[in-house]
Image (cartoon, helix red, strand yellow):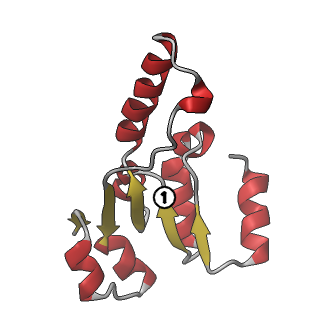
Amino acid sequence: MSKRSFAAIAKNRPSALMTTADPLIISYRREIAAFATKHRLLSTFPDSDAVETGGLMFYGASTSDMYRQAAGYVHRILQGARPADLPVEQPVKLGMTINLKTARTLGITIPKSLLLRADRVIE
């Protein structure tokens, strides 16, 4: 991500930032998390690793689980299945990671009900 990208986001003064599971975004997760904290943005990320580096929260499917599920589709197609005949599948398990250190830095309190649902809470 370029300095211009960060400057454009800061100029618009959003109150939150949500990232997607894009390889470019994931490769800059540390910088994005630092930017979000510096600009006091609530932030959600596509994986727990970004939350470990300072992002506020992750909620979603495990990327590794999604890759395994995709591999199953590839296997079935290589075995002769027609892609149009394969069912659309959704993630089986969703996870949540919350970084309380980042929450404190942002001056927000995470509701206890949300903390109880989290798979992992980073102190």
Q: Is residue 54 visible?
A: no
Residue visible at 55% across and 67% down? 36
**Left or right, 84 with reference to 34:** right
Residue 81 spot, x, y in % from top left = 51, 19
Q: How many marks?
A: 1
Label 1 neighbour load within 10 Å: few <14, some 14-19, many 20+: many
Residue 83 percent location from the top left of the image: 59, 26
* Residue 32 in the image: above or below residue 107: above
Q: Relative to 64, does residue 5 appear above or below in the rendering? A: below
Q: In which quarter of the image is residue 60?
A: bottom left
User: Residue 104 location, x and y as percent?
Assistant: 35, 81
Quadrant in which the C terminus appears: bottom left
Instruction: Identify the residue at the far top of this view.
Output: 79
User: What amino acid does circle 1 point to?
Assistant: Phe
What residue is shown with label 1?
Answer: 45
In the image, residue 55 sits, relative to residue 84, either above or below, namely: below
Residue 114 relative to residue 67: left or right: left
SS for callout 1: strand
Residue 84: quarter of image = top right
Residue 104 visible: yes
Q: What residue is at 41 percent from the left and 51 percent from the top?
A: 47
The structure residue drawn at horizontal position 56% and vertical position 31%, both measured from the top left corner, is: 85
Give the side of residue 100 with respect to residue 77, left or right: left
Measured as percent of width and height from the top left, residue 102 is found at 38, 72
